[in-house]
Image: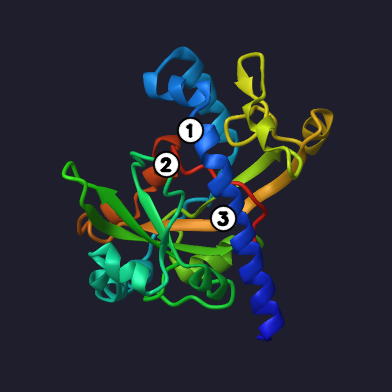
């Protein structure tokens, strides 16, 4: 792969992460975020909107070979990231906290731009794009696992080759309507009590997005899968798809075009 291709990939990731860092604090302060925390009726409507923007890979019947492959990924990942139980080591190796201004995230992502670029071209279970932490009551970060990513163009077969679809469900964020570049204040716009832009908006088509003067993105970033290798030993604890739900991603809403 050429240096110029790598540079373009890295630039795309940096721009997306920078945009998200600007937008996330605004979204966290919106009425929709407050309603979600309160469990109100409008929050249920917002949750329905969020589901419109989440695509999951289809389930497949499992095989012994699938189980063996997934187990090998877990074994390799556990050994590779155990050294990052202390976030200081993670930061020293190039992982940075995503959206550090958002407090009380359910899961904190420490991500490496370079690892994300590399996952476009190869899959190495020992080199995930993100490390996943939960914050304990005493404020100490606890390593729970990692996140792998894959290009948004990948087919189910290509994703299955990395982590079996019978064991884990990859997910990606789709059909977002974004404010035009430089119009950050428009993230706060609402219509009929619902956000106009972002992952809580009912807008899921380019035509509807064009009508409000937005910029439509059919997918954000790309495919993702969490491997919670320190949450337990059973497949459901490690690969369970609850991480793709709205609650897990609260405070982690992303903006920008994917690689």
Q: Is residue 81 above or below residue 153?
A: below
Dot 1 falls on a residue whose secondary structure is helix
Residue at the location (65% across, 86% down)? 1
How many residues crowd around disc 2 within 10 Å: few (fewer than 14), some, or many (20 or more)?
Answer: some
Dot 3 falls on a residue whose secondary structure is helix
Q: Nearer the viewer, residue 14 or 107?
A: 14
Q: Nearer the viewer, residue 156 or 41?
A: 41
For label 2, the residue is 102
Give the CA separation, mark 3 to mark 2: 14 Å
Residue at the location (51% across, 63% down)? 149
Q: Nearer the viewer, residue 106 or 126?
A: 106
Quadrant where the C terminus sits is bottom right
Give the CA separation, mark 2 to mark 1: 7 Å
Tag 2 or tag 3, which sits nearer the N-term? 3
Give the farthest residue toward the left.
138
Give the CA separation, mark 1 to mark 3: 16 Å
Q: Which mark is residue 17?
A: 3
């Amino acid at each position: 792969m050429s240096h110029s291709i790598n540079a373009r990939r890295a630039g795309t990731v940096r721009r997306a992460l920078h945009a998200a860092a600007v937008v996330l604090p605004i979204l966290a302060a919106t009425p929709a975020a407050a309603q979600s925390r309160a469990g109100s009726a409008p929050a249920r409507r917002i949750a329905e909107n969020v589901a419109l923007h989440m695509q999951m890979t289809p389930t497949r019947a499992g095989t012994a070979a699938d189980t063996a492959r997934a187990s090998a990924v877990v074994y390799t990942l556990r050994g590779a990231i155990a050294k990052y139980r202390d976030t200081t080591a993670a930061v020293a190796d190039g992982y940075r906290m995503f959206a550090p201004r958002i407090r009380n995230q359910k899961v904190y992502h420490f991500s490496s731009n370079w690892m994300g670029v590399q996952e476009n071209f190869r899959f190495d279970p020992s080199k995930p794009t993100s490390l996943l932490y939960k914050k304990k009551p005493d404020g100490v970060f606890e390593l729970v696992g990692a996140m792998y990513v894959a290009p948004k163009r990948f087919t189910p077969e290509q994703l299955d080759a990395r982590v079996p679809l019978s064991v884990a469900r990859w997910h990606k964020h789709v059909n977002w309507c974004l404010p035009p570049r430089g119009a950050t204040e428009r993230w706060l716009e609402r219509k009929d009590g619902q956000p106009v832009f972002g992952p809580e908006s009912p807008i899921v088509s380019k035509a509807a997005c064009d009508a409000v003067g937005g910029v439509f993105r059919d997918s954000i970033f790309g495919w993702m899968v969490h491997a919670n290798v320190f949450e337990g030993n059973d497949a459901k604890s490690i690969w369970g798809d609850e991480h793709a739900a709205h609650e897990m991603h609260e405070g982690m809403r992303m903006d920008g075009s994917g690689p």
